[in-house]
Image (spheres, rainbow, N blue to C red):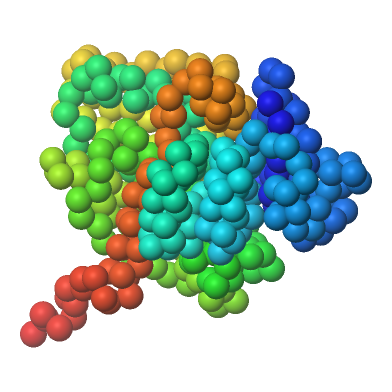
Amino acid sequence: MRVGIIGCGGIAAEHIRAYKACEDVEIVAAADVDLERAQKVAGAEHAYTDYRDMLAKEELDAVSICTPPKFHKEQVCACLRAGVAVLCEKPLAINAAEAREMTDFAAQTGRLLITAFCHRFHEPVMRARDLIRAGRIGKVTMFRNRFGGKIDMTQTWFSNPDVSGGGTIPDTSVHSIDLFRYLVGDAARVSAALEIADPRYKVEDCSAILIQSADGAIGIIEASWTSPGSANVIEVYGTDGAIIIDYSAGGIKFMLDNSGKWEHEPCPNADRFVEQARHFVACVRGERKPIVDGTDGLRAAEVIDAAYAFANGTGGRWVDIGSMLT
């Protein structure tokens, strides 16, 4: 299988490493605005500064798109038009309108479009989904997911809203939104709060999303670039038990079937990028049906748009406690 890479920055390294773990897969071409970076991936003869030249000159079966969100729609549609399957980094698009155009075009062309929600392929998450679906924690009542830390994004495209679409929400909370959908269910109601703790940013560096499913399960999604010592954790609580996935501890911790006892299960094969690549390759070959696709990217984009609308005052409002005091 012949694979191309569009965008050879930081996350591309994980895609490249993962493809190298796949059987009979070769990265044959790469495109990046920095020719030297593309050459390091694919060699001088198959490196391009324009992805359109790569699509025209190379015979590709699939492409990973690892560019910033601003460029996803144009690049995804060009690949699909060329008959090439696409694994597109998150968020699928800079907003839901563009994501919808992309998923519609994938349907029209009949080509494969998968959103790179790698946490679906994290072994503890897969195990959690199995336990939840089997009813081992009863009815899910609450979900919490926090991704945070202390990282300087001020000199990166992540902090440029015209390129990224926002701050911590499209960076990490997009994964959290998909995890809520994957483990709990679709979102029916959304609200959010944003904060710029570091004044150098033009986008939120701290955020919280409150999300609720149609059957009442409540989700709390937290993200921060300015929180040293932050936990990176998924917690799912049900009427009969609970599941905790601590990314720093590894494995999965759970209390099942009203037992009142915590158990820990190691997950030694927890390399989500490799599992994601293997799944994508199998789907391109027709050996598997996708467990995630472009529509999942669209659903996450819709939640993000709703969260920003609420936080910006166009999709709801907070109750001002101060105005109620006498």
- Specify the quadrant that holds the C terminus: bottom left
> Looking at the picture, does residue 52 appear above or below residue 175?
below
Q: Residue at the location (41% across, 29% down)?
A: 291
Q: Residue at the location (36% across, 24% down)?
A: 128
Can residue 58 be seen here? yes
Q: How many numbered marks, from 0 up?
A: 0
Q: Residue at the location (44% across, 51% down)?
A: 105
Q: Which of 124 and 308 is in front in this view?
A: 308
Q: Position of residue 286 (x, y in %)?
A: 51, 22
| In the image: residue 267, left or right of residue 84 | left
Rendered image quadrant of residue 141 = top left
Rendered image quadrant of residue 130 = top left
Q: Which of 25 and 244 is in front in this view?
A: 25
Q: Position of residue 244 (x, y in %)?
A: 38, 30
Can residue 114 be seen here? no
| Residue at the left extreme, as displayed | 326
Q: Residue at the location (73% across, 49% down)?
A: 56
- Specify the quadrant that holds the N terminus: top right
Q: Where is residue 20 in the image (x, y as percent from the top left)?
A: 73, 26
Q: Position of residue 126 (x, y in %)?
A: 42, 24
